[in-house]
């Protein structure tokens, strides 16, 4: 049972004030500690194993409250979700022949679903009271199955109101479950349903509540409700429509720029490079999240093959799981069909505001100071969704492509530097040629690894594949790296021309010695620049394939 703890004693003990969240659409009101954050979402999220994969279940959740970070290494946030959902049709049919209440019937149905989905029931199902109105409710405590990397404890409390299930779900890592329970209890006690009671359901007391016009946060829901029904149907089912995908990309771009503006960053432009879209479709076909394509190409390789000349950083997010996908298709479990706008809103919020599980790498990429463009990939079906974000640094207007078609193995880079930047150096990285066997061996890591730094032209920095967390970290890397095995190439020719604050460069160098030593493979050229404050950063790049 939940421990007895009043709202006032929790606040006094922890010296934490409470804020109020209200939602007009769903008619609920709840208080939460002011050191917790919230995100308006769509569907419950379950993370499987070491990968950053999420499964969207049909639980009707629309808001999630997240516990504060314990430290910078915190990898999981305990959370409380609020949900409203319709009764399954099976329950309504059974109610005509059963003496049990609708709430009891749903509890049995829910228990059966949990057991069938490899959850472990921790305590016997109990009846309880919750919320300001002491509403009759059902409480179930259960845990994720043995296959999880870190077991989670989950507490569900739900009631029946106007023939809908209104519930709260508290989820945390099992070893942290008791720590946040007092705060969660306070939140649950403050929960209030603020819509008019339509009728008295079978076998449950009505809730005394008055109709009240409530405020709600501006969110994707408002945007989505403005779409005509025929368009929203398109987005749910006609997911192969090119026009639908393009509109979703524009919406994603607006979300990214809203977040960047909120943190004082400049907007990024939409890139037309197709690598992100190719990879999203590749991920959807396998139902497996990876930074690699199935033929073993890393993001910067595919980006270069499709004409990219910027420095790349990639985010990948997936809703869905192969195991549960087959159960959704077969009807063995009840799953919510993908709503692409709400899913994009959910994934963007997770990557920016609730990214502790990924050590905030997605957030760093989205808010990077030097991004100029983002190329987007979106692919989905009824129960799976893949999003790929390729953030690009495009600071060079190239006069000619970076190629080595001539037999002398010379690389020539020429172009105009943008945004008052200056040339600093060139780095050359080596990868083995991509293959499906490489994909099968290395598809699991959450972060793809760069190639090996094998040579530099001019100064040696080794920041080409840095995550860009801060300028100081880049400079620290450049000063501390062990460079004894790095070949220092001298330019065959170089020229630098200034016109006001604009610099034009032309550099040519020979990589024959690198090819002789490393043989066939992928050679990635990264051009490192300096900004006006003399901070160094990667301003462009391109991968060259030697396969014969």
Image: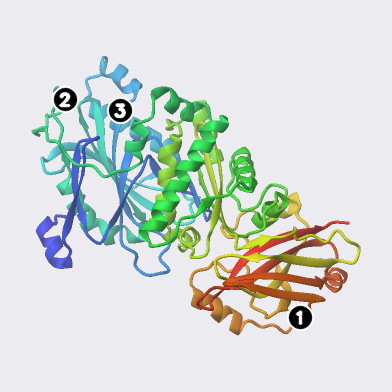
Disc 2 designates what residue? 203
Quarter of the figure with residue 191: top left
Q: Nearer the viewer, mark 2 or mark 1?
A: 1
Asked which secondary structure carries label 3, the reply is: strand
Check the image and tell me how it is coloured: rainbow
Instruction: Tell me the distance, in whole angstroms, between the alpha carbons under discs 3 and 2.
Output: 18 Å
Disc 3 designates what residue? 86
Tag 1 or tag 2, which sits nearer the N-term? 2
Between residue 491 and residue 75, name the one nearer to us: 491
Tag 2 or tag 3, which sits nearer the N-term? 3
Question: Can residue 232 be seen here?
Answer: yes
As displayed, is residue 418 above or below residue 100? below
Disc 1 designates what residue? 488
Q: Nearer the viewer, mark 3 or mark 2?
A: 3
Horizontal and vertical percent position of residue 363: 45, 59
Residue 13 horizontal side relative to residue 436, left or right: left
Residue 84 horizontal side relative to residue 368, left or right: left
Instruction: Tell me the distance, in whole angstroms, between the alpha carbons under discs 1 and 3.
Output: 67 Å
């Amino acid at each position: 049972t939940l421990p007895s703890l009043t709202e006032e004693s929790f606040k006094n003990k922890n010296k934490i004030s409470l804020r109020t969240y209200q939602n007009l659409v769903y008619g609920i009101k709840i208080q939460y500690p002011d050191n917790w954050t919230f995100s308006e979402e769509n569907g419950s999220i379950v993370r499987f194993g070491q990968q950053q994969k999420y499964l969207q279940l049909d639980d009707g959740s629309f808001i999630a409250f997240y516990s504060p970070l314990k430290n910078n290494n915190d990898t999981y946030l305990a959370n409380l979700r609020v949900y409203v959902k319709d009764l399954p049709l099976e329950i309504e049919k059974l109610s005509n022949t059963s003496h049990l209440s609708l709430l009891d019937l749903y509890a049995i149905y829910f228990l059966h679903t949990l057991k069938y989905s490899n959850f472990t029931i921790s305590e016997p199902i109990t009846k309880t009271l919750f919320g300001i109105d002491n509403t009759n409710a059902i409480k179930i405590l259960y845990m994720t199955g043995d296959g999880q990397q870190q077991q989670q404890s989950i507490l569900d409390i739900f009631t029946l109101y106007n023939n809908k299930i209104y519930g709260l779900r508290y989820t945390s890592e099992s070893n942290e479950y008791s720590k946040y329970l007092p705060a969660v209890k306070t939140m649950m006690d403050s929960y209030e349903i603020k819509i008019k009671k339509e009728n008295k359901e079978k076998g449950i007391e009505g809730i005394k509540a008055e109709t009240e016009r409530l405020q709600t946060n501006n969110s994707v829901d408002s945007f989505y409700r403005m779409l005509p029904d025929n368009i929203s149907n398109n987005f749910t089912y006609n997911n192969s429509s090119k026009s639908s995908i393009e509109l979703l990309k524009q919406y994603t771009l607006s979300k990214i720029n809203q977040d960047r503006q909120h943190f004082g960053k400049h907007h990024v432009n939409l890139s037309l490079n197709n690598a992100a879209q190719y990879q999203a479709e590749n991920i959807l076909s396998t139902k497996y999240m990876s930074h690699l394509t199935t033929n073993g190409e890393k993001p910067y390789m595919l980006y270069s093959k499709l004409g990219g000349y910027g420095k790349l950083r990639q985010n990948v997010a997936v809703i869905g799981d192969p195991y549960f996908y087959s159960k959704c298709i077969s009807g063995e479990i009840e799953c919510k069909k993908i709503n692409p706008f709400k899913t994009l809103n959910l994934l963007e919020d997770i990557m920016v505001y609730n990214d502790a599980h990924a050590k905030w790498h997605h957030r760093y990429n989205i808010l990077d100071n030097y991004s100029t463009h983002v190329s987007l990939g979106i692919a989905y079906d009824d129960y799976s969704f893949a999003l790929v974000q390729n953030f690009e640094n495009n600071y060079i207007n190239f006069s000619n492509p970076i190629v080595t078609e001539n037999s002398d193995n010379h690389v020539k880079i020429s172009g105009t530097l943008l945004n008052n930047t200056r040339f600093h150096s060139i780095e050359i990285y080596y990868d083995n040629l991509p293959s499906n066997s490489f994909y099968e061996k290395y598809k699991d890591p959450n972060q793809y690894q760069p190639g090996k730094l094998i040579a530099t032209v001019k100064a040696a920095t080794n920041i080409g594949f840095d995550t860009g967390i801060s300028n100081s970290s880049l400079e620290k890397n450049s000063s501390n790296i062990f460079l004894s095995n790095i070949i220092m190439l001298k330019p065959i020719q170089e020229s630098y021309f200034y016109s006001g604050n604009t610099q034009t460069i032309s550099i040519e160098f020979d990589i024959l010695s690198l090819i002789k030593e490393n043989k066939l493979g992928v050679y990635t050229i990264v051009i490192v620049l300096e900004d006006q404050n003399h901070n160094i950063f990667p301003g462009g790049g391109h991968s060259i394939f030697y396969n014969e």
